[in-house]
Amino acid sequence: MKTILSIACSITIMLSYLCVAETHEIGQKNKDFTKKVLTIKKGDIVKFKNLDPFFHNVFSLSDVKFFDLGSFPQGDFKEIVFEETGEVGVECAIHPNMIMTIKVEE
């Protein structure tokens, strides 16, 4: 019974994120992110889309959100949900000058 309730609670939480979450798109163009700073709400989704004719990577070593989306070619995109508040530094492992900040608010 506890397992069923736990699963039901998890599904409810995930659905509540989906119902109120916004998706924000950040392009990767000319070896740069299309925004240097993005402010979003907790639970929002950020979609990184490669607009360049070569591979990009997206990663963060931030305590708030540690991730590595891997490398992907032109036209492809990767999405990630931000569940915690705070500032997240985002970079491209292939192009070290590509740096941006995502500010996650309540």
Image (cartoon, rainbow, N blue to C red):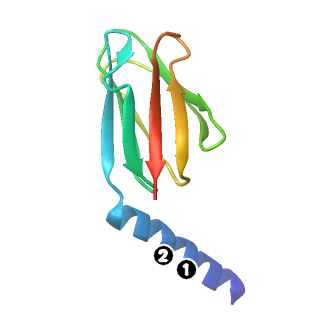
**Closer-to-camera residue (74/89):** 89
| Residue that numbered label 1 is attached to | 8
Question: Which residue corresponds to the image point at 42% horizontal and 64% vertical from the top-left?
Answer: 17
For numbered disc 2, what is the local secondary structure?
Answer: helix
- Image x and y of residue 52, in percent: 31, 13
Image quarter where the N terminus lies is bottom right
| Residue that numbered label 2 is attached to | 12
Q: Residues within 10 Å of mark 1 (few under 14, many from 20)?
A: few
On screen, residue 2 above or below 19: below
- Image x and y of residue 48, in percent: 38, 31
**Closer-to-camera residue (21/101):** 101
- Image x and y of residue 39, in percent: 38, 43
Q: Residues within 10 Å of mark 2 (few under 14, many from 20)?
A: few
Question: Which residue corresponds to the image point at 56% horizontal and 53% vertical from the top-left?
Answer: 84
Residue positioned most to the bottom: 1
* Amino acid type, label 1: Ala
Question: Which residue corresponds to the image point at 58% horizontal and 31% vertical from the top-left?
Answer: 60
For numbered disc 1, what is the local secondary structure?
Answer: helix
How many marks can you see?
A: 2
On screen, residue 76 above or below 10: above
Question: Which residue corresponds to the image point at 50% horizontal and 71% vertical from the top-left?
Answer: 13
Q: Is residue 30 found left or right of 5 in the rendered image?
A: left
Q: Is residue 53 found left or right of 96 in the rendered image?
A: left
- Give yes or no for contact between labels 2 and 1 (Cβ–Cβ under 8 Å): yes
